[in-house]
Image: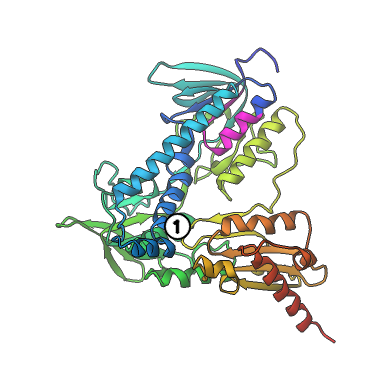
C-alpha cells in the first residue's frame, strides 16, 4: 500500500464488524487505525446490545432452573430472589472483562486505537475530535461500523436525563433501580421479545404491543406460535395488530406510564420499554463531504463486497441493515477487509443461523415453510420434541422442539428451526448439513451421543422419513 497515507485502513466503530475488519487487515500486514467514540472498545454489541442482554438473560436463568431450585430446597435454603443491583453487577463484570479482552486482541495485532468522534473531511482524510486533542488521519480505505441506536417514537416523552426512568429503551434497562411489577413492551421485534421474556421470568407482569399481526415475522411461523404459547404460560399478554398513538407519564406517587392504542385501548404500568426499531449512527460523520448519504433510518447501502457508492469507503454490521447480528457483522467486516486488499474470500451466503435469546431461546437456519410454500418447493417436515428424548427429561426442559424441512424429491435438508434450551448451539448441526448439501440419509445413519439434545435430529429425521412414506402416492 502506498505510503501517501498514514493508515491503510481506518475503521470507525469497534463493534464486531469493526473488530473483524481491523484484525483481518492487520493479519494481512496492513497499518490499521480504529476510531471509537466510547471510552471502552466493543461498540454497541458489548456495552448496550448483545453482551448485556445475553448476560442479563443468563443471570435470570441461573436461578430459575428447576435443578437449582431443588438443590436449594434440599439444602434447606430459602430461594434466592434476584434484584436489579445483582443483575447489573453481573452484567457490568462481564462487560468489563470482554472489553479488556477485545482491547488486548486489537493491540496484540498492532491496531492503533484512537478515542474520539470521527468525521470525514474528504474520502481519504478523517478528523478525530477527542478530549485529549483533535487530530487528522489520512487513510487509503475506510470501514464504517458505527452500529445503531434505538428509535424513539415522537409520541414518547423525553426521560433521557431522568435518574430513575419509567420510559426507557433497551439501552437504558440497566438504569432500572428495581425489578418492576408491571411492564409494557412497545415493539415485538427481537429485542422486545427478548426483554419481555426476561422480565416475565423474573415475575414482572408483561404486556407486549406489536403493530404487526405477529412478533418476529421473519421467523418460522410455527416456532413463533410455540414461543407465544410458552411466554403466555409466564402470563405475558400479547397485543398484536395494535398501533401506539400516545405514551405519557402519570406523575403520581408512585409514577406510572400510560400507553394509548389506536384501537382505543389504554394500559398503565410501572415501566414502558420502547423497542420500536433501530436507527443507524451516522450523525456527525459528515457523509455529505464525500458524497455519501444514508437512508431515512440511517442505513448505508453497500454492494456484495460491502463497498459503498464511494470508492474506498466500506460499511458493515448493523449500519447496513438486516440481519444485524453480531455473528453476521463480524463476517461482513472480514469480507470487506479482504476485498479492500485483494485477498480472495468466499461470500457469507444465506445459510447463516439466526439466534433469538428469548426465554425459551429460538434459532433457525435455511428456509421456512412459508417461503417454500410461496416458492412452490415440495417439502416434508420432521419434528422432535424435547419431551421425547432423555436429555429433555433430565434437564427438565421438555417444552422445546426441533423441526427439519427436507426437499421431497432430493431429500436434501432445506431448513432447521428450534425452540428451547440450547437452540442457538444446536442449530449449527443443521446449518452445517445445509451448507454441505446433506440431507435425510445423514441424520438416519449418523450416531449422536446419548443423552443429548442433538438426538432430536435423529428423532426428527425418522419422523420426516415416516411422513415421506405415508404421503407418497402408490
Q: Quadrant of residue 90?
A: top left
Task: Indicate left or right for 56 with 253 as reference.
Answer: right
Up/down of 360 relative to 233, above or below: above
Residue for point 59% across, 64% down: 418
How many residues crowd around disc 1 within 10 Å: few (fewer than 14), some, or many (20 or more)?
many
Q: Quadrant of the C terminus?
A: bottom right
In the rendered image, the residue lying farthest to the bottom is 474
The location of residue 220, given as percent across then percent down, is 59, 66
Residue for point 74% across, 57% down: 433
Mark 1: secondary structure? helix
In the rendered image, the residue lying farthest to the left is 253
- Asked if the stretch drawn in magenta spans residue 140, the answer is no
Task: Indicate left or right for 352 with 209 as reference.
Answer: right
Range drawn in magenta: 9-24
The location of residue 236, given as percent across then percent down, is 38, 68
Q: Quadrant of residue 316?
A: top right
Q: Depth check: 450 or 287 in front? A: 450
The location of residue 422, given as percent across then percent down, is 55, 58
Residue under pointer 1 = 194
Q: Quadrant of residue 308?
A: top right
Q: Would you say residue 292 is visible in this rendering?
A: no
Amino acid at each position: 500500500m502506498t505510503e501517501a497515507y498514514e493508515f491503510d485502513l481506518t475503521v470507525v466503530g469497534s463493534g464486531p464488524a469493526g473488530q473483524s475488519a481491523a484484525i483481518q487487515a492487520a493479519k494481512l500486514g496492513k497499518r490499521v487505525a480504529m476510531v471509537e467514540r466510547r471510552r471502552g472498545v466493543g461498540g454497541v454489541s458489548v456495552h448496550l446490545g448483545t453482551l448485556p442482554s445475553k448476560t442479563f438473560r443468563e443471570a435470570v436463568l441461573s436461578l430459575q432452573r428447576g435443578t437449582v431450585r431443588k438443590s436449594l430446597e434440599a439444602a434447606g435454603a430459602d430461594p434466592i430472589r434476584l434484584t436489579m443491583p445483582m443483575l447489573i453487577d453481573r452484567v457490568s463484570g462481564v462487560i468489563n472483562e470482554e472489553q479488556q479482552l477485545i482491547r488486548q486482541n486489537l493491540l496484540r495485532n498492532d491496531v492503533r486505537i484512537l478515542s474520539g468522534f470521527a468525521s470525514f473531511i474528504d474520502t481519504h482524510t478523517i478528523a478525530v475530535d477527542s478530549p485529549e486533542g483533535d487530530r487528522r488521519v489520512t487513510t487509503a480505505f475506510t470501514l464504517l461500523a458505527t452500529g445503531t441506536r434505538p428509535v424513539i417514537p415522537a409520541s414518547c416523552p423525553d426521560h433521557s436525563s431522568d435518574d430513575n426512568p419509567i420510559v426507557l429503551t433497551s439501552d437504558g434497562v440497566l438504569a432500572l433501580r428495581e425489578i418492576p411489577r408491571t411492564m409494557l413492551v412497545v415493539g415485538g421485534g427481537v429485542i422486545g421479545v427478548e426483554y419481555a421474556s426476561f422480565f416475565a421470568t423474573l415475575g414482572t407482569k408483561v404486556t407486549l404491543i406489536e403493530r404487526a399481526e405477529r412478533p418476529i415475522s421473519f421467523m418460522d411461523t410455527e416456532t413463533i406460535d410455540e414461543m407465544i404459547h410458552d411466554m403466555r404460560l409466564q402470563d405475558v399478554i400479547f397485543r398484536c395488530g395494535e398501533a401506539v398513538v400516545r405514551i405519557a407519564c402519570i406523575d403520581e406517587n408512585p409514577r406510572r406510564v400510560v400507553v394509548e392504542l389506536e384501537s382505543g385501548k389504554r394500559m398503565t404500568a410501572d415501566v414502558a420499554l420502547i423497542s420500536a426499531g433501530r436507527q443507524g449512527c451516522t450523525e456527525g460523520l459528515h457523509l455529505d463531504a464525500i458524497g455519501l448519504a444514508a437512508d431515512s433510518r440511517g442505513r448505508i447501502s453497500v454492494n456484495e463486497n460491502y463497498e459503498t457508492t464511494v470508492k474506498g469507503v466500506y460499511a458493515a454490521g448493523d449500519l447496513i441493515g438486516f440481519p444485524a447480528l453480531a455473528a453476521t457483522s463480524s463476517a461482513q467486516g472480514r469480507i470487506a477487509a479482504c476485498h479492500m486488499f485483494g485477498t480472495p474470500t468466499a461470500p457469507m451466503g444465506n445459510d447463516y443461523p439466526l439466534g433469538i435469546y428469548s426465554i425459551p431461546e429460538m434459532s433457525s437456519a435455511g428456509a421456512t415453510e412459508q417461503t417454500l410454500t410461496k416458492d412452490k418447493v415440495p417439502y416434508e417436515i420432521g419434528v422432535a420434541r424435547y419431551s421425547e428424548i432423555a436429555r429433555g427429561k433430565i434437564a427438565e426442559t421438555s417444552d422445546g422442539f426441533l423441526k427439519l424441512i427436507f426437499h421431497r424429491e432430493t431429500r436434501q435438508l432445506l431448513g432447521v428451526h428450534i425452540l428451547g434450551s440450547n437452540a442457538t448451539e444446536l442449530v449449527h448441526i443443521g446449518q452445517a448439513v445445509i451448507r454441505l448439501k446433506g440431507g435425510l440419509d445423514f441424520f438416519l445413519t449418523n450416531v449422536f451421543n446419548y443423552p443429548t439434545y442433538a438426538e432430536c435430529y435423529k428423532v426428527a429425521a425418522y419422523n420426516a422419513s415416516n411422513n415421506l412414506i405415508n404421503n407418497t402416492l402408490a
